[in-house]
Structures are given as structure tokens and as C-alpha cells.
Image (cartoon, rainbow, N blue to C red):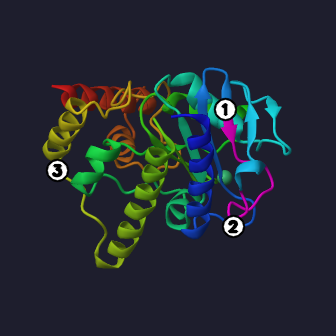
Amino acid sequence: MNEAAVRRDLVRYSHAMHAAGFVANHDGNLSARVADDRIVCTPTRFSKAAVERDSLVVTDGSGRKVAGRFRPFSELSLHCAVYRARGDVRAVVHAHPPLATAFGVAGRPLPHPFLPEAVVSLGAEIPTVPLAAPGPAAVEALKPFARRCDAVLIAGNGVLSWGPDLETAWLRLELVEHLCRIAHAALPLGGPQPLPADMVAALVAKRRKGGLAAPEEGRPPPGPLPGAAAGDDPAARATRRALAGVPGADPALAARLAAEIAASLEGA
Ligand SMILES: [Zn+2]
């Protein structure tokens, strides 16, 4: 896709983000990698409703500005971390869609998977990146997830998603919020029921076969399971319960082993 088309899409999806109610004030940011060392992105301190082609900023691959009247946004370092980790990714978008962000600020993991189609679109995992201070700490927190999935919730922030083009990155963001809207509606009815593990495994296999899977999808993270610290991940909670009072037990190690076993079953 040429740069003129990318600029058109950056404006289009900035406006779509605002129209959908996913941002307020200067929230949200979008970028696209148009060449190895060239990123076009939205400017800082702009309502997404006000972004136009001539307000876009051009940076090099590390986020240093090379052209444009305005400055790039500070969270561009998160986008660059995804671009560095994923040669296949050409676009990254970030917003604060209210329901998805509500799960993050409440310290609750996203209730996924409960709809089969969403597993094919996003995989079996939409992890929550642990809370970290903006800047290098936030980049470090995000890194372990960039190759394992295509959309994350960031605790205390919002949703970050990516893809081979802006349309795909945007559709993933939209889908995460839609899932959260459905889950929220289901809460007074008893909450969404998780899909059976064998169905999830079959859907993940279908996703892999279709070439949709992230490069390291299904692999366990290097540290304790995401959500384990918040105490709300059901697997981590079950592990902690099972190990309570067992002398010398290492809950983090047990959680990691459980995730490795689950991942190996998924690939079987
Ligand atoms: Zn944000």
C-alpha cells in the first residue's frame, strides 16, 4: 500500500475511533509502517476527530520525527516495540474503548474465549499487559506479548492492537470492545460461559491452518502468567488454591508449567 493510501486510512480510522466513542480529549493513537525505517502516525495533543492528512507526522523506525508540522505521540514507543518484534505488522492502533478499558481498570481479565468466531479472529488469548509507568517500563511490559497475539488490554490504559494494515488493526480493536460489550450484557444473566477446551483447540487449529496465528501464539510468557498478580486468572487462581499450604511449592513455576502443558495440548 502506498503512503498516500496509508495517510488516507490514518485519517479515516482516526475519525472512526472518535465516532465510535473509543476516545475522548487527546486519547488514542494510530501509526502505520510504510517502509523499514519510515512510520506515519497521528500527532500528539490532537482530538482524533481533528486529524487530517496534513497533521500527520513522519518518523524513522525508532520513532524520531523526520517530517511534519506537529510532534508524534509519546506512546509511539509502544508501537515501535511491536514493529521491532513483528516484521509482518504494518499498523498499530490504541484507544480507550469504555467497556474493554473498564475490565482493565477493574483488574479483571477479558472474558475470552466465549464466542467461537472471536477465537478464529483473535486466538485463544487476549492478555492483559501488567500496569507499568509510561515510557520504558511500559515498553518492557508489552514486549513479551507482541509475538504471541494481535491485541492486548493494557492495565490502567486501554486496548492496543496491530495487524498487516490499518483496517485489520482497527477491526481487532473494534472486536475486543464488542466482546466486552457482550460480556458486560451477559453479566446480570450469570456471565458468559467459557467455550469448552476441545472446541477452543479446534478453532485455534483452524486459525493456524488459515495462516492467521501470531508467530508465537500459544507459547507461555517468560514470567508468571499474565493476570496471576491480579489474582483473577482462573488457571492461576486454581493453581494457587491447589498449592496453598504445600511446603516448598512454587506457584509461579506451577502456573508456567500448566500454561506449557495447555499450549502443547493445543498444538496436538
Ligand atoms: Zn492510552
Report if residue 227 is visible in the image: no
Q: Is residue 58 above or below residue 13?
A: above
Where is residue 76, by image quadrant? top right
Say which residue appears at 17% left-offset and 50% top-offset: 196
Would you say the magenta stretch is mainly helix, strand or loop? Answer: loop
Q: Which residue is mark 3?
A: 196
How would you rate the neighbour count of disc 2 (Cα within 10 Å): few for under 14, some for 14-19, many for 20 or more?
some
Cα distance in 3D space between marks 3 and 2: 38 Å
State the extent of the magenta-drawn residues as a range.
40-51
Q: How far across and down, in percent of the image, does residue 92 sit?
A: 56, 41
Q: How far across and down, in percent of the image, does residue 223 sit?
A: 50, 27
Q: Which residue is mark 1?
A: 39
Front in this rendered view, residue 105 or 65: 65
**Which amino acid type corresponds to the residue marked 2 in the rendered image?**
Ala
Provide the secondary structure element on which disc 1 rests: strand
Question: Which mark identifies residue 24?
Answer: 2
Q: Earlier in the sequence, mark 1 or mark 3?
A: 1
Question: Which mark identifies residue 79?
Answer: none
